[in-house]
Image (cartoon, rainbow, N blue to C red):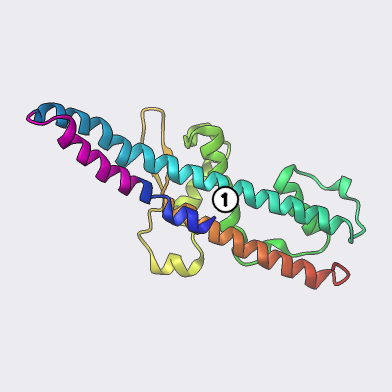
Amino acid sequence: MADFIWKSPRLIEHETKLEQKKLRVYFPGRPDMAEFRWRLESRKLTSVFPYLIAVGNLFTVISSFEVYLLLLHELVKEHVAIKDNLTHGQGATRSINYFKETGVAVSSIALYEQVQAATRIRNCLVHAAGLLPNSRDEKELRRIQTKRIYLDRELRKKSPEDERVAIFGTPLGDKLQITNSYSHLACAYARDFFINLCKAIAEKHTTIP
């Protein structure tokens, strides 16, 4: 998945070259028409397509991550005797809370904060189209973006001006925006956190095969 995310912007590079060739073929001797078409196509290539690629990739990453959490939840339930029906929350949140109730210090696992941030960002993009006033997590999302919580500590030091997650104004209010580079990073964070979570569970519950 990470490899796909990394390579997916090449679609835009390919289509940009193709569109520039079309301008010469479709409108010989009509620079006015070529300019008109380029205004339409360039907006898609520089704005619409990058947005769709970045957001779509983040959706896929977090959705897949949540499925892995649910699978792990089902596996652990077979070997750890606690009352799962008392666990609160839904979906991935329920799984995380279940692991905590079995004694695993989930919030202490490396990249936990970054994975939680990625999930909140995904939720805002899905349920509020990125518009912060329409998100119930507006305050937390602003903190995540301002303090760059979406990055691990090392990257925060190396990239003080990082804008993989940004906020910009629109007529409908401030809107959250991500880059495909962030989706790629979130994929790596989700992978590494999940591996570390499995290790922590195995260390806590040695009876799990």
Q: Main secondary structure of the magenta part?
A: helix
Locate the N terminus by quadrant. Answer: bottom right
Res 16 quadrant in image: top left
Q: Can residue 149 be spotted in the picture?
A: no
| Disc 1 residue type (three-letter) | Val
Magenta segment boundaries in residue numbering:
12-29
Q: Residue 35 appears at what percent x and percent y? A: 15, 31
Residue 26 sits inside the magenta stretch:
yes
Q: Residue 193 appears at what percent x and percent y? A: 63, 63
Left or right, residue 90 beside residue 168: right
Res 43 quadrant in image: top left
- Mark 1 sits on what residue? 61
Q: Residue 67 appears at what percent x and percent y? A: 69, 49
Q: Nearer the viewer, residue 189 or 133?
A: 189
Q: Can residue 57 be spotted in the picture?
A: yes
Left or right, residue 193 beside residue 167: right
Residue 51 sits inside the magenta stretch:
no
Q: Residue at x 42, y 55 (%)?
A: 7
Q: Residue at x 56, y 34 (%)?
A: 127
Q: Nearer the viewer, residue 196 or 144?
A: 196
SS label for mark 1? helix
Left or right, residue 36 beside residue 70: left
Q: Residue 6 appears at what percent x and percent y? A: 44, 56
Locate the C terminus by quadrant. Answer: bottom right
Q: Residue at x 49, y 60 (%)?
A: 151
In this rendering, is residue 158 above or below 61? Answer: below
**Other residues around mark 1 within 10 Å, as few (<14) / some (14–19) / many (≥20):** many
